[in-house]
Image (cartoon, rainbow, N blue to C red):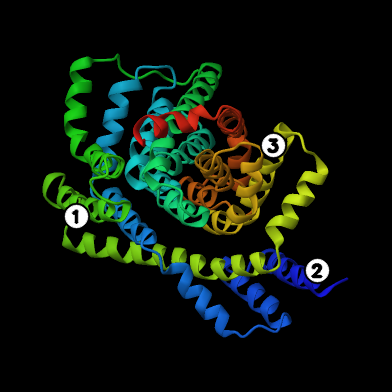
Amino acid sequence: MNANTIAILILLVSFFIMILLRFPIAYAVGISSVLCLLYMGKSLAVVVQMMVKGVNSFSLMAVPFFILMGVLMGSGGISEKLIDLANSLVGWMRGGLGMVNCVDSFFFGGISGSAAADTASLGTILIPIMVKQGYDDDFATALTISSSVQGILVPPSHNMVIYATAAGGVSVGSLFMAGYIPGALLCISLMVGTYIISVKRNYPKGDRFSLKNFIKQLGKSFWALAAVLIVVVGVVAGVFTATESAAIAVIYSMIVSLFIYKGTDLKGIWKAFGEAMETLSIVLILIATSNVFGYCLTLLNVPKLAAGAITNITTNPILLALLINLILLVLGCIMDMAPIILIATPILLPLAETIGIHPIQFGIMMMLNCGIGLLTPPVGSVLFIGSAISKVKLERLVKATLPFYLCMILVLLLITFIPQISLWLPSLFMK
């Protein structure tokens, strides 16, 4: 066994051992990288240099602004307006509140950009209402956490910014545009699953559709939905960069929350800054330590070795695409989203490109894979948030989520094998 192989084993084995021992992911990534570099005889100054280099990126400046925008909008009275809008649109169907849950997550996902924020903000309102109207608590919670994955796909999403940085040179605007159709497909897929279950369990319908009421609720929700227009249209049209648009959206969110919807006050704004800083600190330390980990992988030629090992299993493009998805799904069971993006992208993206998968298409595949991972034990953070809100035990919640896993896997396969689902809008607007 040569020195290179031993160094790879030290890096990966120590990392997975610390993951199994429930080390914080940033520590697991950082410590395993340090052990590897020490074995290779490298100076630990390299660790500091790579950590600084990892966060020294102009495009990453958009991340704190998007996180803050989501927190501000989530605490500023936006959730109720979007629930009323969704109810006026789809509440008349069988299982109407379940349909509202799906559509509302599509709207709110475009504002928060976070599955966790979606679950925390909408779940505290919708789950008790659904249970009160006769829906099973495990079904209501499972649907809430499943629909929250739309928050990762529907722009603006700070995870897309992280992927664009990890992939190197991928347009954030193109990724934003690429997320809309997959997000809509996921919404429709979950609605179909909800309808089938609702008919089987005889869940109630809502009030009949009223165009007048829909227009009224659309008017009330306009200021919330306009935040998405500021970010996406601004970036796509080239008016400003993703970072500039995110900063403008933060100011806009503060004005809407304070003076239009009046859902918070100055004390609430200060609290939102604190929550955003807490989330940001976790994200940035992950980015910094993951860059050291990525440096070790590159130094040891792991991406090429991994690609060779996978292609030794099969050279069939369809099987390779399925294998890439399987690897990402398994990683989602043991790691959080940001480290998967930062560590797996340099390894799997080159392999995906060899079988004709476009970097933007791969980015959307990664977003959905990681989103499913957020609902999967033992690490699934959104799964735990949903359980904490509804007080439904994890065992019951995972069982209730199984039909929605199937809905999400179906959409994932469509995204994987029909490239235009992801690439049509970027090709139309990002020429």
Residue 377 appearing in the image: no
Local secondary structure at mark 2: helix
Frontmost residue, 193 versus 2: 2
- Where is residue 312 shown, x and y percent of the image? 82, 45
195 to the left or right of 74: right
C-alpha gap between disc 2 and disc 1: 51 Å
* Marks 1 and 3, the one that precedes in the sequence: 1
Q: Are marks 2 and 1 in contact (CB under 8 Å)?
A: no
Q: Which disc number belongs to residue 322?
A: 3
**Dot 1: element:** helix
**Above or below 43: residue 122:** above
Q: Nearer the viewer, mark 1 or mark 3?
A: 3
Mark 2 vs mark 1: give the one in front: 2
Disc 2: which residue: 5
Res. 251 mark: 1
Q: Residue at x 36, y 37 (%)?
A: 430
* 65 to the left or right of 163: left
Amino acid beneath label 1: Ile
Residue at the spot 60% in from the left edge and 56% down from the top edge? 346
Instruction: Residue lying at the far front in this picture: please name it.
Output: 431
| Residue 258 shows in this picture | yes
Label 2 vs 1, first from the N-terminus? 2
**Screen quadrant of the C terminus:** top left
Left or right: 270 as drawn, with respect to 133: left
**First in residue order: circle 3 vs circle 2:** 2
Viewer-side residue, 231 vs 282? 231
C-alpha span from label 1 to label 3: 42 Å
